[in-house]
Amino acid sequence: MQIEPVKSYLLNLQDSICAALAEEDGEAAFITDEWQRAEGGGGRSRVLAEGAVFEKAGVNFSHVMGENLPPSASASRPELAGRSYQAMGVSLVIHPHNPHVPTSHANVRLFVAEKPDAEPVWWFGGGYDLTPYYGNREDCIAWHRVAREACQPFGEEVYPRYKAWCDEYFHLRHRGEPRGVGGLFFDDLNEWDFDQSFAFMRAVGDSFIPAYRPIVARRKHQAYGERERQFQLYRRGRYVEFNLVYDRGTLFGLQSDGRTEAILMSLPPLVRWEYNYQPEPGSPEAELTDYFLQGRDWLTEAGE
């Protein structure tokens, strides 16, 4: 098991994603903030703010280590409690200005849990998901098509499995609704050997920009007004609720005394809540929950 190639890949992935997003934005640049963590390790945060297209885009690399795995990392595997660990990954969230451009999140990561006189335990995780405010069937199908193509070299069963896991994971149980239209989610991946697992992580990481950027390009000039903007801010509240209540990455970062600015980089710059909001029946706002946020099998429905 060699982790240096994984670290090198992740740093290059951060570079390539930032370059593609900055090019698509066409106006703003990413600022870079390098940081160190007292217990061990550090990271490189990059944030683009108030661009022509992106209200906020954050792409974070971190490589941290510690003496004991936090509860969020060992809850499902109690036999690992008490081991020292290394965790490295790239995590990003993109919040566009235009409500017709979906928010998107992605991450890829490697965990290694170690103790003296025992073989290290390692696993990969990651994925990406799409959170539209105004749904578009063409975008949903294209998004899932790229996700399926990334998975296909690893077996026909991989995309359906990780698509279903994404639908299950990104679900606001207290709201009874999904966060978005899904994508891929995988964790605790070590059923393949290290090289195959790393190859799959790379396939997921490398496919994010081909999945997301064409959607941004199609929607970024679409007209919108104050109604659409206010609905976008309202729906962003769901994003905040998920990240602060359920997200394992956020919990891991906070429980491991990570850098708060980097951990909460995922939150949108503006958001609102409204008591008992009900969209007008038959409106585009109602269509989001009535049609798009229904855990659909987009590719099967499209006949693919």
Image (cartoon, rainbow, N blue to C red):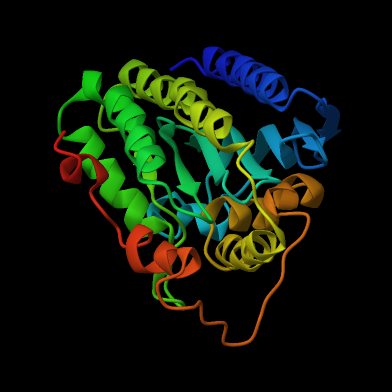
Examine the rendering and report whether any part of residue 186 can be seen.
no
Q: Nearer the viewer, residue 255 or 57?
A: 57
Residue 176: give x, y in percent of width and height.
39, 75
Residue 146: give x, y in percent of width and height.
35, 27
Q: Is residue 281 left or right of residue 14?
A: left
Q: Nearer the viewer, residue 194 or 131?
A: 131
Figure quadrant of the N terminus: top left
Q: Residue at x 80, y 39 (%)?
A: 37
Q: Is residue 38 left or right of residue 84?
A: right
Q: Nearer the viewer, residue 157 or 35?
A: 157
Examine the rendering and report whether any part of residue 279 can be seen.
yes
Residue 168: give x, y in percent of width and height.
33, 58
Q: Residue at x 81, y 48 (%)?
A: 261
Q: Residue at x 63, y 16 (%)?
A: 16
Q: Is residue 297 left or right of residue 60?
A: left
Q: Is residue 268 left or right of residue 177?
A: right
Figure quadrant of the C terminus: top left
Q: Nearer the viewer, residue 125 or 212?
A: 212
Q: Residue at x 35, y 16 (%)?
A: 195
